[in-house]
Image: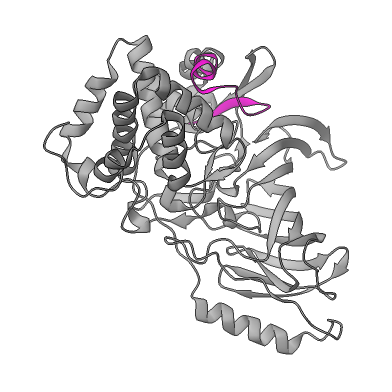
Amino acid sequence: MTQRSRTGAAAPLAAVLTALALLAAACTGATGGVRGTPGAAGLRDRYFPKQGNGGYDVRHYALTLAYDPGTGRLDGTAVLTAVATQDLSAFNLDLSGLVVGGASVDGTPAAYHRAGNELTLRPREEVRKGTEFRATVTYGGVPEPVTDADGSREGWLRTGDGAIAVGEPTGSMTWFPGNHHPSDKAAYDIALTVPAGVEALSNGVRTARRTEADGRVTTTWHAPEPMASYLATVAIGRYETGTATALGSVPVLTAAAPAVAVDSAALRAEIPAILDRQARRFGPYPFSAAGAVVLGNGTLGYALETQTRPVFPVASFGRTTLVHELAHQWFGNSVTPAGWRDLWLNEGFATYAEWLYEEEYEKVPARASFERAFAERDNWAFPPAAPPTAENLFDPPVYQRGAMVLHKLRVTVGDGTFDRILRGWAEEHRYANASTADFTAYAEKTAGRDLGALWEVWLYGDGRPERP
C-alpha cells in the first residue's frame, strides 16, 4: 500500500458474548452429549481484537456475486470450506452491514445470529476437531464502506459506473462473510454477474465468461494460491484492458478507466519487465497471474497491493509506486504478516524495493535514499515493529524506518548475504504467515551471527540515533 494513516473499528466484545448466550438458549437443534464450544469471536489482534475468528481454518472461498451498478445492490452467496481446529458447537464470521438471508453447514440449515460485525452460525450437528466442513451464507444489500480515522474509505466503494473493492485492513468484511484476519489465508473462486457492457475483474486468472438468459454477463476468476482476505478485490465498470505475458508463462491482465487508459498504457506495459527484474532479486514470482487496475480521479486516495492485480488511482500510478505494489506480491502477499503488528514486513520491504530499483536503474544509491529518510523527523515517531495504535499502522515509520532497518542489515552483513536473506525469506515462508521474530531469527541464521544490537536500535529503539 502507498503510505497513509488508516484504522478500522470492531464490535464490542460484550455484545458478541450476549449474542452467543442468546443463540445458545434459542437453538435446540444440536444433538445431546455436547462437548464442543463456540469458536472465539475475534483473534485478539493487538490493533483489531475482534477481527478474525477462532476455531477453524478456511481453506477456500467460493463467492458468487451479482451487482447492479445503478442501484448499488450486491447479492451474494459465500461458500467457505474450512477445517475445525477444535470441537465446534458454533463459530463466527465477520460481516458488516449486509442482510443475511440464510445459512447452512454441510448442506443442513444452521441457526444464525447477527451482533454488530459478527455473524454467528450454530450448525445442527457439532463439527468435530480436524473435520472439513462447508459453511454457506446467502446475503444482500447495498454495501457500506468503512471510513477510517483520516477520512479515507475502504471496503466496497461505488464508482460512477460500478464499484471497486479494497480491504486493508478491515474492509473486506463489507462485501463477503469470512475469517477476516491476515493469519487465515485461503484460495478463492469468484463469480461476478453484472450488466452487459460492464467489465468485472478480480484476483487470479479469468476462467470463464458467459452471457445469462437475462442478458447479464458472468465472469469467473480463480486464485489458487493462499490469499489473505484484505488482498481480495473486485473491479466493476467500463475498463479498457490489455494483456501480456511475464516471466515466460505468467498472464498479465491490466485494466484502466477509459479516461486514463491512454496515459497509463506505457507504464502498464512495463509490468512484465519490472516483474522480471524483481524475480531476479527476490526469487520466483509466487503467483499464477499478474496485472493492475488503474482508476480514474476521485475514486480512491491510495494504491493497494491486491493479490496478482494491484489497484491504483491514476494520480499515484507512477513507476516507483508500481515497483512498490508489485514487490508486495512477494513481501506481504506471498509472505503475509502473522498479525498487524508485523506490517513493516510488508511496507518496509516494499519501500526498500523502491530504493533497490532506483539504485539499479536510476543510479540513485540506496545510501542516498537511506540518508533522506533518516533526515525526516516523521520517520522517528515510533519503532517500525511497534506502532502505538491501529491509527498508526500506515504511518511513515512503518514504511521509511522499516526500509532503513533493511538497509542497515545490508550494510552490516554485506550485499551477498543480504541478497540471500531477501530471496531466502521469500522462499522459506512462501504462501505462509510470518512474524517479526521469524524474520530476525532467519536473518541471524543466514548471516551466521547475532544481530541483536542492530534490532535494538533500528527495529525496536525509540528516537533517532546520533548517526545514520
Examine the structure image and report whether residue 286 is included in the region drawn in magenta: yes
In the image, residue 286 above or below residue 14: above
Q: Give the color scheme: rainbow, by chain, secondary structure or one colour.
A: one colour
Is residue 429 shown above or below 63?
Answer: above
- Frontmost residue, 201 versus 348: 348
Q: Is residue 54 left or right of residue 357?
A: right
- Quarter-wise, where is residue 110 in the image? bottom right
Residue shown at the point (63%, 45%) measured from the top left? 69
- Direction left: furthest residue: 466
- Residue 300 visible in this rendered orientation of the protein: no
**Displayed quadrant of residue 364:** top left
Instruction: Please name whichever residue, 368 or 70, is drawn nearer the observer in this view of the structure.
Output: 368
What is the x, y in percent for residue 245? 65, 14
Q: Looking at the picture, tell me which residue is in the foreground, 207 or 277.
A: 277
Start-end of magenta stretch: 274-295
| Residue 57 percent coordinates (x, y) | 69, 56
Image point 24% across, 21% down: which residue? Answer: 367
Horizontal relation, residue 396 to residue 132: left or right: left
Is 394 on the left or on the right of 128, as rendered?
Answer: left
In the figure, residue 194 lies in which quadrant? top right
Q: Which image quarter holds the C terminus?
A: top left
Q: Is residue 375 left or right of residue 223?
A: left
Residue 234 among those drawn in magenta: no
Total count of labels: 0
**Could one spot residue 30 in this view of the protein?**
yes
* x then y, percent, for residue 103: 78, 67
Image quadrant in which the N terminus is located: top left
